[in-house]
Image: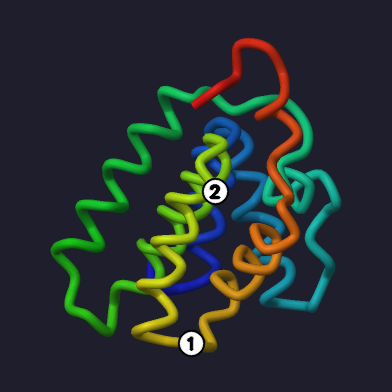
């Protein structure tokens, strides 16, 4: 999870499905090779737009990354903590996400995805699926 490419692919797959994860991996690899932009469809997932993810899947992923963060050496915790923040946010739990982001800032104040999430939470942006009936986390 320390590699942003793999962390982002994992988040995309947890929020969608295996095919979504494969699309995210292909897009990330194309970006790494040639600078080709990541498709808007994938960017929208990170911003909480589109179909609601399976909340059970998100909760299970949250459990996994929390365990990874707890077991990782301190310097390796920003990636799983940031993933935990995104997953919490995706479940409509911005307060929990903020706590994970505080932990990241204590370790690496410049961790880029954490800074983006912190901005999103700071402007009270919640995933649009959090407002749909039956998609509460």
- For label 1, the SS is loop
Query: Residue 71, which numbered label?
Result: none
Query: Picture coordinates of residue 86 (x, y %)?
Result: 53, 52
Query: Picture coordinates of residue 4 (x, y %)?
Result: 52, 71
Snapshot colouring: rainbow
Quarter assignment of residue 72: bottom left
- For label 2, the SS is helix
| Left or right, 104 with reference to 50 | left
Which of 34 and 84 lies nearest the eye of the viewer?
84
- Distance from disc 2 to disc 1, alpha carbons, whole Å, reads 19 Å
Residue 29, above or below 57: below
| Left or right, 129 with reference to 55 | right
**Residue at (58%, 70%) from the top-left corner?**
113
List the residue tagged with mark 1. 109
Q: Residue furthest left?
A: 71
**Residue at (68%, 12%) from the top-left corner?**
133
**Residue at (45%, 34%) from the top-left corner?**
58
Rate crowding at label 2 as few (under 14), some (14 to 19) or many (20 or more) other CA atoms within 10 Å: many
Rate crowding at label 1 as few (under 14), some (14 to 19) or many (20 or more) other CA atoms within 10 Å: some
Q: Earlier in the sequence, mark 2 or mark 1?
A: 2
Query: Residue 94, which numbered label?
Result: 2
Q: In the rendered view of the protein, which quadrant contains the N terminus?
A: bottom left
Which of 20 and 92 lies nearest the eye of the viewer?
92
Quarter assignment of residue 76: bottom left
Query: Picture coordinates of residue 128 (x, y %)?
Result: 75, 34
Which of 112 and 12 lies nearest the eye of the viewer?
112
Which of 5 and 67 lies nearest the eye of the viewer?
67
| Left or right, 94 with reference to 84 | right
Quarter assignment of residue 30: bottom right
Dots 2, 1 in contact, CB < 8 A: no
From the image, state whether disc 2 or disc 1 is nearer to you. 2
**Residue at (69%, 68%) from the top-left corner?**
119
């Amino acid at each position: 999870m320390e590699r942003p490419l793999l962390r982002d692919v994992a988040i995309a797959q947890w929020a969608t499905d295996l095919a979504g994860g494969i699309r995210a991996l292909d897009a990330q690899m194309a970006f790494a090779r040639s600078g080709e932009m990541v498709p808007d469809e994938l960017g929208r997932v990170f911003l909480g737009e589109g179909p609601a993810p399976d909340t059970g899947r998100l909760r299970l992923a949250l459990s996994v990354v929390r365990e990874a963060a707890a077991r990782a050496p301190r310097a390796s915790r920003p990636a799983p903590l940031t993933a935990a923040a995104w997953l919490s946010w995706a479940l409509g739990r911005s307060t929990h996400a903020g706590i994970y982001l505080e932990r990241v800032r204590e370790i690496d104040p410049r961790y880029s995805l954490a800074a983006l999430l912190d901005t999103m939470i700071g402007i009270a942006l919640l995933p649009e699926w959090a407002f749909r009936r039956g998609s509460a986390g």
